[in-house]
Image (cartoon, rainbow, N blue to C red):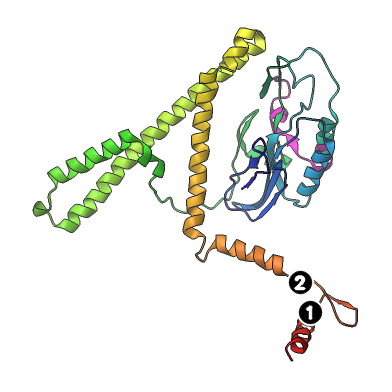
């Protein structure tokens, strides 16, 4: 689910699975997705607040969220520190912006809490470095309903992992990752495995159907082994880059020098991490598109949700009869339509 807006610099997205109701805005600054996640009704939201003081946008965002009284998980770039003493590295103390005060007021009114600050009340860590002001700030937040606190499995200033109990998962079904077919070394390995298999298992020695079934099991096992190796290597590279970046940021916290600032913003470190993140997003998008392609025209949840939305758009809640009275009863609405078309075509 995404809200792109009309600018390349704006956009928010969520990948929460198959939920039912989606709310977006025209500018691409917010998205709200509501539905059932596992056994719970839950609302996910993502926000990209403007980089100027706009408390009205925050108020409208929480007003939209208030339409869904279920548990909330909100994440995004709020573009303002909540506490200028704890969430900024600058020695100059300033008063919170109007947008920050609007966020705090909404948290008091609707109940969500800043989960990272709740779990780390005395820790100073940041999510953004301003090269202009040479300072750090924590402007990327996760706000969640208090009832979800004990389901938080992992957390950092920009990452949260929540496990909701009662989620019913079906049996795992293995599928070939199509991105593996773009790797030359993978194709060479599989080609070599196919050649080796048929060199030792020619059809005259065994019935062709047995050779074919055994080949499918053999080659699938080889693909799974290679896929696991690629995933492990990918994860190790990502962890190393994140560790190196976190170490550079920690050094910069302690000594805000130009040399250490250049290390944090160094193209190899940031670029390689962005490439890995883009690859993960590309894989998720490809999987989502293939799911819609495979199931879009078949009887199932996706088609049912689309038909439900179309039915809601065509629904006529009331009608004004020829005598000027408004009717909200379905049978009377049908009678008015019947009378109108009967006179039209008579």
Q: Where is residue 93 in the image (x, y as percent from the top left)?
A: 83, 16
Q: Is residue 126 visible?
A: no
Mark 1–mark 2 contact, CB under 8 Å? yes
Can you say whether 53 is above or below 196 in the image? above
Quick one: quadrant of the C terminus? bottom right
Q: Where is residue 20 in the image (x, y as percent from the top left)?
A: 64, 56
Residue 28, by quadrant, is: top right
- State the SS at label 2: loop
Considering depth in this image, is 80 or 181 the residue closer to the camera?
181
x 73%, y 88%: residue: 345
Q: In this view, does 270 lie to the left or right of 319?
A: left
Q: Residue furthest right?
A: 324
Q: How crowded is mark 1: few (under 14 residues within 10 Å), some or many (20 or more)?
A: some
Q: Magenta region: which residues? A: 107-126
Q: Position of residue 227 (x, y in %)?
A: 37, 38
Q: Is residue 261 left or right of residue 108?
A: left
Count of marks, rendered view: 2
Can you say whether 164 is above or below 323 in the image? above
Residue 54 part of the magenta segment = no
- Residue matched to label 2: 316
Q: In this view, does 185 lie to the left or right of 53?
A: left
Using the numbered discs, state the Cα–Cα distance from disc 1 to disc 2 in whole angstroms. 8 Å
x 27%, y 40%: residue: 190
- Residue matched to label 1: 333
Mark 1 or mark 2: which comes first in sequence? 2
- State the SS at label 1: helix
Considering depth in this image, is 95 or 123 the residue closer to the camera?
95
Q: Residues within 10 Å of mark 2 (few under 14, many from 20)?
A: few
Can you say whether 181 is above or below 263 in the image? below
Residue 116 part of the magenta segment = yes
């Amino acid at each position: 689910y995404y809200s792109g807006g009309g600018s390349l610099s704006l956009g928010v997205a969520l990948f929460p699975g198959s939920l039912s109701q989606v709310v977006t805005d025209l500018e691409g600054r917010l998205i709200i997705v509501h539905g059932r996640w596992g056994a719970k009704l839950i609302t996910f939201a993502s926000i990209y607040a403007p980089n100027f003081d706009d408390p009205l946008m925050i108020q409208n965002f929480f007003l939209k969220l208030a339409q869904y009284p279920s548990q909330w998980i909100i994440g995004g770039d709020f573009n303002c520190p909540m506490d200028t003493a704890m969430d900024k590295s600058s020695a100059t103390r300033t008063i919170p912006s109007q947008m920050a005060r609007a966020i705090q007021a909404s948290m008091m009114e609707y109940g969500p809490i800043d989960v990272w600050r709740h779990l780390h009340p005395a820790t100073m860590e940041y999510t953004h470095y301003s090269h202009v002001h040479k300072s750090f700030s924590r402007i990327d937040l996760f706000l969640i309903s208090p009832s979800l606190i004990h389901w938080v499995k992992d957390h950092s200033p920009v990452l949260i992992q929540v496990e909701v109990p009662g989620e019913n998962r079906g049996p795992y079904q293995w599928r070939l990752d199509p991105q593996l077919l773009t790797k030359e070394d993978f194709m060479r390995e599989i080609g070599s495995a196919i050649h080796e298999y048929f060199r030792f298992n020619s059809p005259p020695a065994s019935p062709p159907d047995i050779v074919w079934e055994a080949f499918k099991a053999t080659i699938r096992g080889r693909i799974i082994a290679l896929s696991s190796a690629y995933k492990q290597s990918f994860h190790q590279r990502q962890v190393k880059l994140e560790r190196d970046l976190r170490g550079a940021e920690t050094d910069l916290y302690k000594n805000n020098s130009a040399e250490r600032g250049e290390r944090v913003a160094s193209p190899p470190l940031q670029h390689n991490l962005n490439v890995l993140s883009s690859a993960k997003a590309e894989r998720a998008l490809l999987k989502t598109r293939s799911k819609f392609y495979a199931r879009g025209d078949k009887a199932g949840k996706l088609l049912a949700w689309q038909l439900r939305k179309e039915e809601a758009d065509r629904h006529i809640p009331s009608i004004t009869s020829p005598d000027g009275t408004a009717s909200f009863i379905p049978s009377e609405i049908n009678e008015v339509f019947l009378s109108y078309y009967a006179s039209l075509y008579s």
